[in-house]
Amino acid sequence: MRTFAMIAALAACGTITPPNGSGDDVGSGSGSDIEEPHPPDTLYGHVHDERGDTIDFSTNEPVHTHAGPSIDLSAGCPAVYKYAYLMDDQSPVFGRQTTTNPLAWHVTTDVASLDASATAYRVRADNGAVLLDWTPTAPDSTGIYTVELHRNGAHGIAALGTQRGKMYVDVRFRDTSGSETVDSACWEHHPLAVPLQIEQLETSDLFQMSLPADSSISSLMSSSVTVYSTQVIQHAGEAVTISFDGAMPTGHYDTKYVDDYVLDSTFSNGTATTNNCGDSPCPSVAPINPPAILSDGALAGVWTTMVVDDASGSPVSLGTSWTIPARAANEAPHAYHVLIRFSDLDQLQAPASMATGLAYGEFPVASLVYTGLPSSETALQCTGQGHHVVNHNGIDLAVFWCITGQHFTRVVALDHVGLQFEPFALTVTTAGEPAPYLPNSSVAIGARSWDAGDDGI
C-alpha cells in the first residue's frame, strides 16, 4: 500500500473548463480538467475557492461566477471552501454557475496486470469514519480516472453539506495477483451555506422623526425606535441559519428642556362664574419662564434587535440569529429586515428639578403638540377685571373676576434633542462560516447624527 499523499496549499492555477465547453452549467460538472501531465498514482486537481465568488441576484436566483483563487489539490491538505448546494449531482431549484467548479481529483496508474473490476475509491473523515465506502470507478479513453464528489445522488456524501475538517479520498488499484496500491489525498473541508442577498446597514425610523413634525420621540424613553436596518433576501431553495454579531453602537446625546407656561387661550367676556379670582385681585402679569436647561453626555440606553418578515410584517426573531426557511419552488424571493432598535434612554428625560414622576409622551396644548410630561397646572394673566362686594355673615367682602385676559398651561417639554452615533458594524455568519458573499463578511455604516430640531416652545 502506498503512503498517503497529503495534499496542500493555495496556488494560483488555470481556470477549470466545463466538459461541454459552455459558460452556464447547472450542476457541479464532470470535473474533466485540462491538466499538465502528472506522475502515475498521484492524485491531482484544482478547485476555486468559492469564498471569492461574485454572485448576481438580479434574475431572482444566485448566479455564481467562481472568481476566487484556484487551489492545488495535489500537495498538502488545503482548505477548500465550497457552496454545499452546488455540490449536488443535479442543479439546485434556484442557483446557477457560469462555469463548473467540481471538487474532483484525477489519477493514472502504472500497476501492471490491473484487475479493473477492483478499481474503486472511498472517502473518509479525519477520525477514520468512512463517509463513502469503496465505490467502483473506471478510466476515460485516455486512461485517466476522475473522482468527483457530490453531496447527494447515487454516491452522495451527506457530510459534504454539514461537516468541517480534514477528509481523505483514497483510490485503490489491484493487480491480478491480489496486490493492492492505494493512492490518497487530503483536504480540509469547509461547506458554505446558500448565499443570501444582504444589504449594508442603513438609517431607519429614528432619522425620519422630528420635534416640529410631532413625532413620537418619547418612545426613545419608554418603548423603542428602529435606528438602523438591513434587508436579507432568501433566493435559494435551501434553509440557512444566519447570525449578525457585534457590539452595539456607541455615541452621545444633547438635549434642551424647557419649563414654560404656554399661552393656550384668550378671552374677553369673563364673569365671576368663569374667571373668579376670589377675594384677591386677579394676577395682571404673565407667568415667568425659567431658563432652559441644557444637558449632554454619552449614550446609555438599551439596544435590542428584531427580525421581521417583510411579507407578513410579523417578527420572526427577537435576536439577530434565526433560521431562514427554504424558498419554495413556486415562491418569489423572500425578504426579511433586521432591525437595530434603541430604547430606555433615560438621559433624554427632564432634569430632576423638573421631573414630576409622570409618564413621558406627546401631549397637545393650544395648537402645539410637545414631547414631555403631562401637566394640569395653569396660570392666568388678567388685563381687565371687575369686582363687587358681597356680605358674608355681616362682613363685606370684595370678589374679583377677570373680564379680559389669557390662560396659560405649564409645559415641561423636550425642546431640542440630538443623537450622534459612532461607526457601527456587525459580522455576518451563516451555518458557522463567515458569509463569503459580503465584503469583509460584515454589514456596516459610518458615523451618523440625528437632530430632532427645535419645537419652538
Image (cartoon, rainbow, N blue to C red):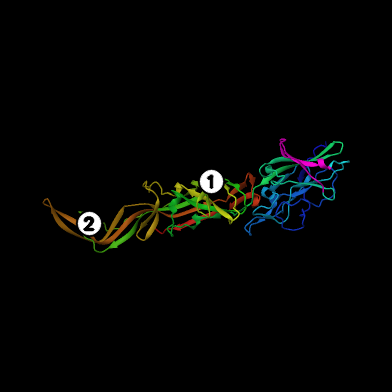
User: For residue 409, which quarter of the picture?
Assistant: bottom left
- The residues bearing labels 2 and 1 have C-alpha atoms spaced at a distance of 59 Å
Specify start and end residues of the magenta stretch as a single range.
116-139
Q: Say above or below: 408 vs 118.
A: below
- Image quadrant assignment for residue 396: bottom left
Residue nearest the observer in this picture, 410 or 110? 110
The residue under label 2 is: 276
Which of the 4 quarters of the picture holds residue 212? bottom left
Q: Amino acid at mark 1?
A: Gly
What kind of element bears circle 2?
strand
Q: Is residue 177 within the magenta segment?
A: no
Taking depth in this image into account, of 188 and 393 the one nearest to the observer is 188
Q: Is residue 76 visible?
A: no
- Label 2–label 1 contact, CB within 8 A: no
Residue 176 placed where, x, y %? 86, 38
Residue tagged 1: 319
Tell me: 390 left or right of 323. left
